[in-house]
Amino acid sequence: MKFKSAEGAQWNTAALFYVFLTYCLGWWLLISATGLFGWLLGSLIIGHSMIIAAYLIHECAHNTIFKSNQDNARLGSLLGWIC
């Protein structure tokens, strides 16, 4: 998988890392939280990761993340599971 540009590679990698990290963290908070605060925080974190994932799906639909259309489609499908 080759990114379309070197600058885009840095930003897109950071965004993808953020999405997967916060999605996992949010679910961990939902599962392990004992109080209302942990549940609310986990819900907000998951919601934000889903919003960023939706923006990335939009970019994949325009084939602006990777050079290959197939790579953009695969990433869009993966992010679709998060959304």
Image (tube, rainbow, N blue to C red):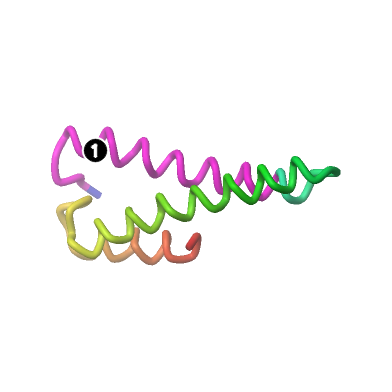
| Residue 11, magenta (yes or no) | yes
The residue pinned by badge 1 equals 9
Q: Quadrant of residue 37?
A: top right
Report whether 48 appears left or right of 11.
right
Look at the numbered disc 1 and give the secondary structure of its residue: helix
**Measured from the top left, where is residue 51 in percent x and y?**
43, 54
Range of residues picked out in magenta: 2-28
**Residue drawn where x is 57% and y is 45% of the image:** 45
| Residue 6, magenta (yes or no) | yes
Report whether 48 appears left or right of 27.
left
Report whether 75 appears left or right of 48.
left
Q: Amino acid at mark 1?
A: Ala
**Measured from the top left, where is residue 12 in percent x and y?**
30, 41
Nearest the camera: 33 or 13?
A: 33
Our reading of the magenta stretch's main secondary structure is helix
**Residue drawn where x is 18% and y is 33% of the image:** 7
**Measured from the top left, where is residue 75 in percent x and y?**
34, 58
**Residue drawn where x is 50% and y is 46% of the image:** 20
Report whether 14 appears left or right of 47.
left
Q: Quadrant of residue 76?
A: bottom left
**Residue drawn where x is 71% and y is 44% of the image:** 29
Q: Quadrant of residue 18?
A: top left
Rate crowding at label 1 as few (under 14), some (14 to 19) or many (20 or more) other CA atoms within 10 Å: some
